[in-house]
Image (cartoon, coloured by chain):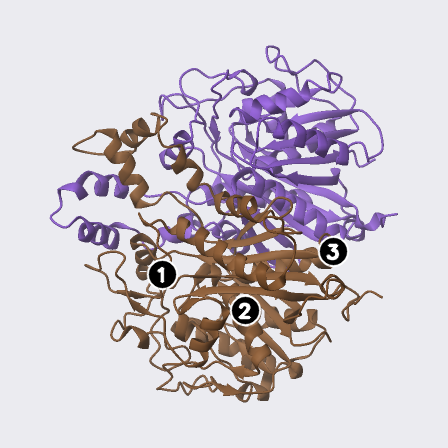
Amino acid sequence: MADPRREAWITGIGIVSCLGEGGDAHWQGLSEQRITVDAESFAPYLVHPLAPLDLDKQIPKKGDQRQMEAWQRIGTYAAGLALADAGVKGNAELLAHMDMIVAAGGGERDIAVDGTILSNRGKAANPAAYLNERLMSDLRPTLFLAQLSNLLAGNISIVHGVTGSSRTFMGEEAAGVDAVRVALARIAAGQSELALVGGSHNGEREDLLLLYDAGGHALRGAFRPVWERAQAGGMVLGSLGAFLVIEARGHAEARNAKPLARLSGVTSERSPRPAGAVTAALGRMWQSLVHSAAGGRIAVLSGATGAEPATGEERAWLKTMPDVPVRATGTYIGHGFEPQFAMNIALATLALVRDKLFPAAATSGVEQGYEGPLDRIAVTAVGHWRGEGMALIERAT
Amino acid sequence: MTARDKHGRPIVVVTGMGVITSLGAGKADNWAKLTAGESGIRRITRFANDGLKTTIAGTVDFVPVEPFCSTELGERMAAMVADEAIAEAGIGRKGDFPGPLFLAVAPIEIEWPHRETLAAASGANDAVGYDDLLRASASGRFHAIHERCLFGSVAEHLADRLGTKGSPISVSTACASGSTAIQLGVEAIRRGEADAALCIGTDGSVNPEALIRFSLLSALSTANDPPGGAAKPFAKNRDGFVMAEGAAALVLESYDSAKARGANILGVLAGCGEMADSFHRTRSSPDGKPIIGCIRNAIADAGLTPDDIDYINPHGTGTPENDKMEYLGVATVFGERAKSIPVSSNKSMVGHTLSAAGTVETVFTLLTLEHQRLPPTINYKVPDPAIPLDVVPNVARDAKVRHALSNSFGFGGQNVSLVMSREPA
């Protein structure tokens, strides 16, 4: 029998996206099924733009704001919201033993510098020398620090004082799953008491669009919900940040912190994805997490990206469980890769706290009407290229 | 009877190692050159040096990658060191490693050759912008660039090849990444999640933009002539680190698992410590507290005291700032003994292998324990009176070493220390 004091409680969430900032704004947006898409800035590509933030509220020093690029500001802001929600913000003693696992990609390039070099290098007498010369004189020295993957964690340490430990996992959706998985495993094993886990993504970038479009995964033209992007599929990138404060129950009780929900399990899989592998992996993860847990009314909160064939394989798995209500969040907040899993765990937590689901997407063919009540939610993460994960979130009694 | 450490956890041992640096491929070659005090630093020939302040690096030119791609080189070196480590450990079967993969890898990005391929394909002949690159990417002909430039691609390809179990973890804690990968493996075995883990660090970052980024932060040595003399850790005339490439792999196992299959135990991963620094993005807290706390955490995690440490493999980059702050940390933790504990920097010879450094230096520290011989700090000609350490100046020597400490520090306030022992405590 596992020690109940080693249960993992979610005691704080911090989220920002196109739907706004914080739990209430997100629930409001999901309840209204609000689609916030910018079809102009990167036409013919679509993005879900970040709602305006008053950065001063979570990143009080302008100097810190200037040292970061957008992805770091989004993440540092969301981390501050999570720390405040958990009641640990500014508590030096707790922050000094807080373990941080950030899931991160890399930061923004200087689009203008790239354009200048690409436009002129071919005409230069010595193209190799020209590249060196332009990079040496045109790159801002501190841009590197806004690009390094681990510098979101670094900025969170600086701005919020989280210093127990700092680890950054890279690798798109799977990094987001494994960050939560490892944080939970450490808590369960007594290696950690208090953890800050999550990440951020700036979806409003040509350089990232280029990467995903090269793979054929960026949606062009008219917006469609994630389940309805036809055979070619496609993702709509979203700017979002999501952090969770996860805490050993014993630690939370000792400081009189209340649980929002219990994080009962996280599992992940991988394969080179022969046809059917994703569907099978989801089935195995469901068996291991859900069938081994106590019963109760359950729903699936899907992290479907819209990319194919991944989304089609998840849809095939969901069809094997017609009685389980399903909701996909990507239609409303877009896809942000690394932070997506933490975001969906946060949204599942909101649903459990409210004891209901937001409305189904009527035309999806996957989502069925169901309001509540709810005891448990399984959150899925199927990477657009690789990596599958699932979490089980339960009502904290 | 289960073997437990002083904290009641499974003991974690090393049963296989592999390494590549600018000195060469494999443990034997590297150890011979390291203890001979040879430098792997050379003039960069991979790309033009025009306009660069630093024209030297510890490149791994003997692993050919054409056209050059840093991520591709990193992946190839990782595969090579993994093969060496797994062969030595004699664990699992080919393509079927019985445990998870923890990979320290440089952040992955679209590189200039990729960008130029797309620019050429766009057909734009005057001003080229991202709109043009996107027009090229939309053709559907560049799926390979997508897969190559995903952050998870190196670990996924290695997992395909090596048959490691579960979702592979790609970690970055900047220049401490290699040690964090090992720490993650140690923790997984201590939790009982796995009997074995494969920990790899790899970095093939010597390309124009990566070099220029460090150069613009004034982090690199500009003492280009002769190249082998540039990396001068702890010397008064030190003027920066030397970028380098390399990779290393370790097979970690629980002591019980290694014993049960009759494996040769190469050393013990006895303790891990970390502490993040909230002072500044590139500089250490002036009071040294995070470094001090990190070292103390590692020694306590190993169930030892500072008096038990016989040798320190420092971060020792050769930047004015790092070496000064590392000395403060060592002097504070070890007190009077700081003057007499040997502290030698492998980076004086192989350069700074960045994301791989913690893994490379863990392998070298374990070889130091195995051979009871200390590799030197070369290029130590002008002692710094502010850093009165025994840096094993210029010449290797024999020593009795039971327990050793390895430090790794990185931008973003990352500090990780590992403690290794010859035998289980």
Residue displayed at 73% across by 27% down: A354
Name the residue beneath numbered marker 2: B363
Name the spot of residue A187 as percent of width and height, x first.
73, 51
Q: Answer left or right for A139 relative to A184.
A: left
Residue displayed at 42% across by 80% down: B234
Name the residue beneath numbered marker 1: B62
Chain rendered brown: B
Residue A73 visible to the viewer: yes
Whether A207 is drawn above or below B136: the answer is below
Name the spot of residue B39 as percent of width and height, x first.
36, 75
Whether B107 is drawn above or below A71: the answer is below
Name the residue beneath numbered marker 3: B191
Name the spot of residue B278 as percent of width and height, x first.
53, 60
Tag 2: amino acid: Val
Q: Answer left or right for A212 relative to A225.
A: left
Chain rendered purple: A
Name the one closer to the observer, B255 or A173. Answer: B255
Quadrant where the N terminus of chain B lies? bottom right
